[in-house]
Image (cartoon, rainbow, N blue to C red):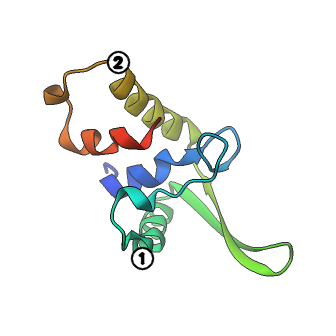
Amino acid sequence: MPQTLPQRLYLLCYTVDQGKFQLDNKPKGWLQFIHNKAHTAETPVRDQLSARGEVDVSRGKVMGLIPADRVTVAHPQDVRALQDRVRDTVLGGADPASIPLDELATRRTVR
């Protein structure tokens, strides 16, 4: 089953090498690319990906005090392939008319 646009945006922000959501060595959220009220979407999108077995969510605490969820992707090679495909679309100079609309929407997320 193909991923939805919000699911792909969520996964695009995952740094495979470091095993966390981070881009350009600075933490960034994926929600800003959806809508200013999109913070309400993070949990449902994460839960959808978890139900599909694409991410694992574990509950823990930061510094032993602050509750936090740790999200790990099940198939880092698929996330890297998604990131590479979007990066190639942006940097490859492809004709925008030849790119599916949902992929065009993700072009801004990779710098």
Mark on residue 40?
1
Q: Secondary structure at mark 1?
A: helix
The answer to which image quadrant residue 96 occupies is top left
State the residue in front, 22 or 54.
Answer: 22
User: Mark 2 sits on what residue?
Assistant: 92
As displayed, is residue 67 above or below residue 76? below
View extreme (right): residue: 64
Residue at 76% in and 79% down: 66
Tell me where residue 42 appears, x and y as whole percent.
Answer: 46, 69
Mark on residue 25?
none
As displayed, is residue 58 above or below residue 19? below
Question: Could you give the CA–CA distance between mark 1 and mark 2, rounded to whole angstroms?
Answer: 34 Å
As displayed, is residue 104 above or below residue 84? below
- What amino acid does circle 1 point to? Thr
- Which mark sits nearer the N-terminus, 1 or 2? 1
Tell me where residue 24 appears, x and y as whole percent.
Answer: 61, 39
Count of marks placed on residues? 2
Tell me where residue 49 appears, x and y as whole percent.
Answer: 46, 61
Residue 43 horizontal side relative to residue 101, left or right = right
Residue 6 horizontal side relative to residue 73, left or right = left
